[in-house]
Image (cartoon, rainbow, N blue to C red):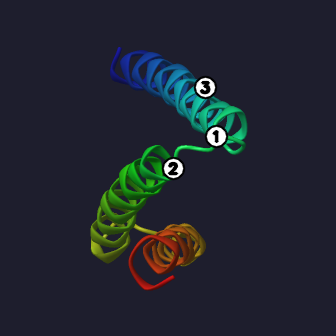
């Protein structure tokens, strides 16, 4: 009985993770569309606000992945995600605050 329950819970967990991955993909596509369609906007304050919003979102993403990577269950490959979020946040921070 325990083996069947574990197998069922593992299957449900895998299906839930697939759903979360698909939802995250949809969110990233939405962000990409927003950036693409607003890239030619002549209103500079709108562009600066969009860059600020993306900078804040990427900073939160970096912190979340860093905390997850520092947890005992993380794998070494998780540092790639941390580096990607850090590069995104640093790049947007540069364009928003320095340039």
Q: Give percent across and percent down for residue 38.
A: 63, 37
In front of the other: 93 or 44: 44
In front of the other: 89 or 65: 89
Give the spatial CA distance, label 1 vs label 3.
24 Å
Which mark identifies residue 96? none
Which residue of the protein is positioned furthest toward the front in this rendering?
A: 42
SS assignment at label 3:
helix
Q: Give percent across and percent down for residue 18.
A: 58, 27
Q: Give percent across and percent down for residue 8.
A: 45, 16
- Indicate left or right for 1 with 8 as reference: left
* Count of marks, rendered view: 3
SS assignment at label 2:
helix
Foreground label between 3 and 2:
2
In front of the other: 7 or 53: 53
Q: Is there CB contact under 8 Å for labels 3 and 2? A: no
Which residue of the protein is positioned furthest toward the bottom in this rendering?
A: 98
Residue 52, quarter of picture? bottom left
Which residue, given by chain and number where applicable, does mark 1 sit on? 41
Which mark identifies residue 47? 2
Q: Give percent across and percent down for residue 71.
A: 27, 70
Residue 97, quarter of picture? bottom left
Q: Residues within 10 Å of mark 2 (few under 14, many from 20)?
A: some
Which residue, given by chain and number where applicable, does mark 3 sit on? 26
> Residue at position x 64%, y 40% from top?
41
Residue 75 vs 9, above or below: the answer is below
Give the spatial CA distance, label 3 vs label 2.
22 Å
- The N terminus sits in image quarter: top left
Residue 27 vs 40, above or below: the answer is above
In front of the other: 98 or 64: 98
Q: Which of marks 2 and 1 precedes in the sequence?
A: 1
- Indicate left or right for 41 with 24 as reference: right
Q: Is there CB contact under 8 Å for labels 1 and 3? A: no
């Amino acid at each position: 009985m325990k083996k069947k329950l574990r197998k069922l819970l593992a299957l449900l967990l895998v299906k839930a993770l697939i759903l979360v991955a698909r939802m995250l993909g949809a969110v990233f596509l939405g962000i990409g569309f927003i950036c693409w369609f607003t890239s030619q906007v002549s209103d500079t304050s709108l562009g600066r606000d969009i860059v600020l919003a993306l900078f804040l979102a990427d900073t939160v993403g970096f912190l979340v992945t860093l905390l997850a990577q520092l947890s005992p269950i993380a794998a070494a490959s998780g540092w790639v995600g941390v580096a990607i979020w850090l590069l995104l946040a640093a790049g947007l921070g540069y364009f928003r605050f320095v340039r």
